[in-house]
Image: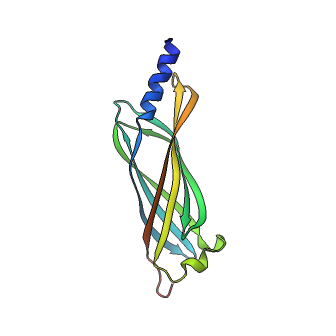
Amino acid sequence: MCIRDRHLYLMYDAASKLEIKDKAIDGMDYDGGTRFRLRFVIHLRNPTSTAIEVKTITYAVYVEDVYVGEGRKDSLTIPPGTTRHELEFVFDAASVPGLTPKILGKSVLGVEVKGKVTVPVKAFGLLEYTSLTLPYDQEESVNVRTLPEGW
């Protein structure tokens, strides 16, 4: 095995050990008008002795089975051990077709967050050779905090 191939194997092996340890919808707040703020937490575990680069954490958000949007967090370095990463997503219910009638008058909403963590495998730490993807999906009933009376 040549040096380049051995290096790529080691990088691939390290990247493949990253795992999603836990994930949770941390809460949803009413932000005024028809705006809401959703918080999502993902714990990534790096069992190796060196840091692992994460290219992106992407996510798509569904409320009451209606797609409301997506977001991403780029360029993370995951040190050895388990790290907590908070993602925040703000949306305006009035701008999402069909959502307002489904949520009006409710203080508990069905929320689903689907996404993936993308880990690049780089040749000599410079050129991305390939990437690994860790998919995730979290669905919960969420209490909406700070709703005004009569919502």
Residue 37 position, x and y percent, is 50, 66
Nearer to us in this view, 81 or 139: 139
Q: How is the image coloured?
A: rainbow
Q: How many marks?
A: 0
Of all residues, the one furthest to the bottom in this rendering is 150
Vertical side of 101 occupied by 43: above or below: above
Identity of the residue drawn at 53% across and 70% down = 36
Query: Is residue 31 depicted above or below 42 in this figure?
Result: below
Q: What residue sits 53% from the left and 27% below the top?
A: 122
Q: Is residue 25 left or right of residue 132?
A: left
The residue depicted at 49 percent of the width and 12 percent of the height is 1
Location of residue 121 with respect to 93 vertically, above or below: above
In percent of width and height, residue 112 lies at 50, 62
Query: Where residue 79 appears, x then y in whole percent?
Result: 37, 37
Residue 133, x across and y down, in percent: 52, 41
Q: Which residue appears at 41% of the width and 38% of the height? A: 18
Which of the 4 image quadrants contains residue 82?
top left
Front position in the image: 88 or 14? 14
